[in-house]
Amino acid sequence: MTRYLLDTHVIYRWMRDDRRLGREMRRILSQSDCAVSAASVWEMLIKNSHGKLPLPEGSLGDAMEAQGFWVLAITARHVEATRRFDQAIADPFDRLLVATAAEEGMFLLTQDTGILDLARRTRLPVADITA
């Protein structure tokens, strides 16, 4: 079974029942082995503290697990693997997510056009779900 690591915006759109996810993405999210990096939880909390992202009260980790996702801890191995993507991916959270997916043998599930474009030209562990 394919395992997926969810990009932060995918998680947020899922939590908000956002139609931009599309039918195929929703199917994958509801039926697959999907993880959320602790980095995404951290990124959402940072954005929330700057007033850019409304979040529900309580634990985001618990909210992710209630949605059927599991939370993946950030390890030194994940952080060190970001070196491979320093030149290609400017955003540190995106770089960490791609590196984590590579290290864990997972596919990053994203709708980020920059990451998707880069993945089409290189060998990034990214799932390109267009439907």
Image (cartoon, rainbow, N blue to C red):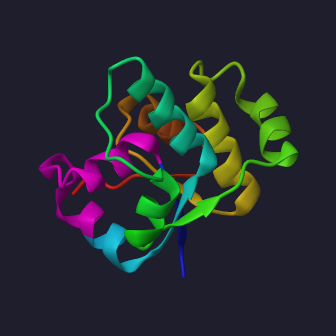
**Quarter the N terminus occupies:** bottom right
Residue drawn 27% across and 47% down? 13
For this rendering, which residue is in front, 35 or 83?
A: 35
Residue drawn 17% across and 49% down? 18
From the viewer's perspective, is 63 left or right of 12?
right
Question: What secondary structure characterizes most of the magenta part?
Answer: helix
From the viewer's perspective, is 97 left or right of 10?
right
Q: Position of residue 127 (x, y in %)?
A: 46, 55
Q: Position of residue 71 (x, y in %)?
A: 59, 61
Residue drawn 33% across and 46% down? 12
Q: Is residue 1 above or below residue 111?
A: below
For this rendering, which residue is in front, 78 or 105?
A: 78
Residue 123, visible in the rendered structure = no
Q: Position of residue 113 (x, y in %)?
A: 36, 32
Residue drawn 80% across and 29% down? 83
**Quarter the C terminus occupies:** bottom left
Residue 114, visible in the rendered structure = yes
From the viewer's perspective, is 35 left or right of 9?
right
Range of magenta residues? 7-26
